[in-house]
Image (cartoon, rainbow, N blue to C red):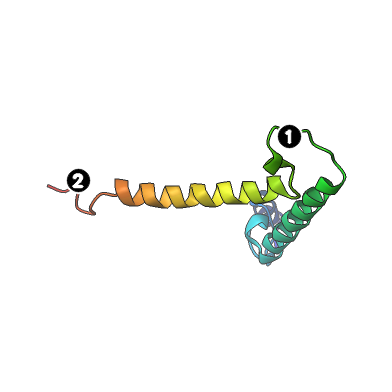
Amino acid sequence: MTDRAANTAASRGGSEGSGGPWLTRPSTIRGLWWGGGILLVLLTLGDLVIHRHTPVELAATFGFASWFGFAACAAMVLAAKVLGAVLKRRDDHYEP
């Protein structure tokens, strides 16, 4: 590989044969999933150590922030799917 090709490959985020940009490599994606899962477990286990003063008794349950965050995210995804179906236009809407 010439110096010019090496510089171009380095500016794109990788070298020849590296599997493309670093964020799309399967090993990077797998590492991000593992890292996110470990972080979620550690933050949830922090609930055992940290005492919170909550206005509602339900918020004092173990792992409340984790399961509430997951439920809120799932609800937003479902709401977006419903909203997309309601606002969807026909494929030929703008054609004369």
Quick one: label 2 or label 1, which is nearer the N terminus? 1
Q: Which mark is residue 37?
A: none
Residue beneath the point at 74% across and 47% down: 61
Residues packed near mark 2 inside 10 Å, few (<14), some (14 to 19) or many (20 plus): few
Spatial CA span between label 2 and label 1? 53 Å
Query: Mark 1 — residue?
Result: 54
Residue beneath the point at 24% across and 54% down: 91
**Amino acid of disc 1:** Thr
Compared across the picture, whether 94 is left or right of 86 comes to left
Residue 87 in which image quadrant: top left
**Amino acid of disc 2:** Tyr
Nearer the observer: mark 2 or 1; the answer is: 1
Q: Evaluate if marks 2 and 1 touch, with contact meaning CB atoms under 8 Å apart.
A: no
Residues packed near mark 1 inside 10 Å, few (<14), some (14 to 19) or many (20 plus): few
Residue beneath the point at 85% across and 48% down: 48
Q: How many marks?
A: 2
Instruction: Indicate the quadrant containing the N terminus: top left, top right, bottom left or bottom right.
Output: bottom right
Question: x, y percentage for residue 34?
Answer: 74, 61
Question: x, y percentage for residue 46?
Answer: 83, 47
Q: Which mark is residue 94?
A: 2
Front residue of 96 and 56: 56
Compared across the picture, whether 28 is left or right of 71 comes to right
